[in-house]
Image: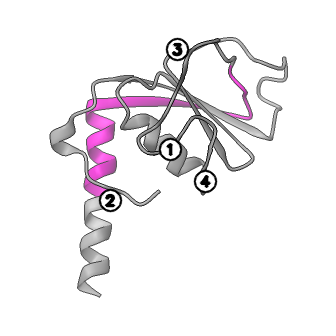
Amino acid sequence: ADTESSSASLLQVDQSAAKTSRSCQTFPAWRLKYTAGSEIPLGPLAYGGSIGDWDACLHLCSTTQDCAQVVFAGGHCYGMSVASNEDQDDLGGSNSHYTSAHCSGQVDLGKTYARNC
C-alpha cells in the first residue's frame, strides 16, 4: 500500500511540474491540421503509436520539448513539432473521434518523473 501511495504522489508532482514549466491547451472534438514534415516521436512512442488514452498521449507531448501539437484518435497519438490553428476536417468542435492540444514552454527535466503511459 505504501508503494502505491508513493507512486500516486510522484504522479501528482509530475503533473504539477508539467503545469508550471510547460502548458497545454486542449481542444476536445477537434482534429487540428497536420503540417507535412512535423511528425515527431513522443519519448519512446513513435508518431501515430498506440497508447492507452488521451491523458497518456497529452502527458507525452507535455514532457517532450519539441512537441507543439498532439492529436489523439482511435487509441493512437500523433506528436508534431508545428502547431496549427486550422481544423483538418472542417468539423471543429463536433469531430468526436479526435482530441487535439497545443503545448508550449520549457520542459523542466529536473522536475519530470517517469510515468507508465
Q: Which residue is mark 4?
A: 53
- In terms of secondary structure, where does tag 3 sit? loop
Mark 3 or 1 closer to N-term?
1
Mark 3–mark 4 distance (CA, rounded to whole Å) = 22 Å
Q: Which amino acid, by three-letter code, is at mark 2?
A: Leu
> 47 or 11, which lies in front?
47
The mark that comes first in sequence, 2 or 1, is: 2
Q: Residue sitting at 28 percent across and 77 percent down?
A: 5
Q: How far, Cα to Cα, is label 3 from label 1?
A: 18 Å
Q: Badge 2 is on which residue?
A: 11
Crowding at dot 4, Cα within 10 Å, few <14 / some 14-19 / many 20+, comes out as some
Q: Which residues are magenta?
A: 12-32
User: Which tag, 3 or 4, sits closer to the chain's start?
Assistant: 4
Rendering coords of residue 89 (x, y %): 83, 20
The alpha-carbon separation of the residues under discs 2 and 3 comes to 28 Å
Label 1 sits on residue: 45
Q: Position of residue 76 (x, y in %)?
A: 66, 44
